[in-house]
Image (cartoon, rainbow, N blue to C red):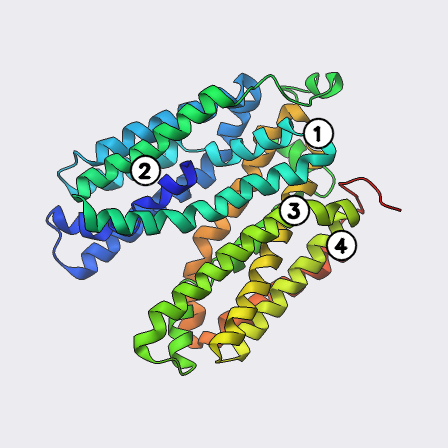
Amino acid sequence: MGYTGFTVSMPFLPLFIRSLGVTDIGEISVWTGVSLAITPGLTALLAPWWGRLGDRYGRKIMVERSLISFTVLMAAMALVTRVWHVLALRAAQGLFAGYGSLSVAMAAESAPRERMPNAIGLVQTAQRLGPGVGPVVGGILAGLVDLRKAFLVTAAFYAAALVVVFFMYDDHATHETPSEEAERGRVTFRSVLAFENFFLMTVVIFALQFVDRSFGPILPLYIEQAGVSHARVAIVSGVLFSIMAGTGAIGHHICGRLLQRFSARVVIAGASAAAAAGSALLGATGSPWLMSAASALFGIGIGAAMTASYSAAGRVIPAGAHGAGFGLLTSASLTGMASSPFVAGFLGAASLRFVFVANVVLMAIVSLAVRRGMVESRLGPRTD
């Protein structure tokens, strides 16, 4: 619910900014872009610190703190009278965010060690599908109700998520061991980065998120350039993005089973190679059917590699440092998310195909680096 609520306001935010007296299209675009970017930007900076506080004072109360603040701030959006009020409230959301990394940490410590990939995959499936549903809900709300009331509906999503966490999550039902419990408070960010494979997984997660978000600025333009009629560009783009989101969720979901049969090194390297192949096929064809197949291959590869990377990193983090560790991983993910559209836009200005080439090269480098540089580990039970 929280992930859905986070993206509900995206479709009608430009309309809302225009209703506040900004009439120039360029100014509306700038205000909208900055307002949308500032929240994940600040979240990326602060996620490790919120995670550290979660390690110290409890993750459930930190998630409740974040959801309460989002409920209040989204409701306050319905009362703003100046465009800078919107920017200030979006900045405040970034300052008080952090439930994303904490929810992954909560899933990781709530499951037995051998079931950790399944738990992380389930949360990441929600993270993937929530933003897919949110804009659709927001677009419907923009047409059905007053824009200010739509923010109240968004606040209701966060309130519902708060109720679920408060009543249904038992922060005592964890699978920490006494030795892990004794490590609480003694793990620093530097020591987390020094854990086996952790720094490599941080870089891999950044690269996966970077590639995953690179198509947003250029895919509709590429589709039209490939010969799809202008009238069909929007629907073809929407279908391809939906396929990527849906198959990405499938990749998250099936990763746990893959990790029961293969090592994390094999799964991440293989899934990254699949994402590279999907990106290559997507940039080499103009057929909507082949583009759909390429999008599916790309989505499954990214989803499986992402969950396997989080699981491999989570396996080496002591329970007392889950918040800080997953906070660092989330910061890497959000940094990739924020920087990718800018880089893709500049590459696309030279040639749209450069974006696909860059994605293939980056995924090939990730696959090779993991195959050669990752210490072998098996997250699930052996089947041999």
Q: Which residue is drawn at 34% across and 50% down?
A: 135
Q: Which residue is drawn at 65% across and 40% down?
A: 118
Q: Residue at x 50, y 42 (%)?
A: 126
From the top left corner, tell me how far across and down residue 291 is, in percent.
51, 73
Which of pointers 4 and 2 indicates the residue nearer the eye? 4
Q: Mark 4 near mark 3, Cβ–Cβ under 8 Å?
A: no
Callout 1 amino acid = Pro
Using the image as rendered, state which of residue 118 and residue 35 is in the foreground: 118
Q: Earlier in the sequence, mark 4 or mark 2?
A: 2
Q: Mark 1 near mark 2, Cβ–Cβ under 8 Å?
A: no
- Can the viewer see residue 358 in this picture? no
Q: Name the residue under label 3.
A: 309
Which corner quadrant of the image does residue 130 belong to? top left
Q: Which of marks 1 and 2 is nearer the N terminus?
A: 2
Q: Mark 2 points at which residue?
A: 91
Quick one: SS at disc 3?
A: helix
Q: Earlier in the sequence, mark 3 or mark 2?
A: 2
Cα–Cα gap, marks 1 and 2? 37 Å
Using the image as rendered, state which of residue 153 and residue 329 is in the foreground: 153
The tag on residue 266 is: 4
Q: In this view, does 168 lie to the left or right of 270?
A: left
Callout 2 amino acid = Ala
Quadrant into which the N terminus falls? top left
Cα–Cα gap, marks 3 and 2? 29 Å
From the top left corner, tell me how far across and down residue 226 is, in percent.
43, 81
Q: Determine crowd level at label 4: few under 14, some 14-19, many 20+ residues with C-alpha closer than 10 A.
A: many
Q: Determine crowd level at label 2: few under 14, some 14-19, many 20+ residues with C-alpha closer than 10 A.
A: many
Quick one: SS at disc 4?
A: helix
**234 relative to 69, above or below:** below
Q: Name the residue under label 1.
A: 112
Callout 3 amino acid = Ser
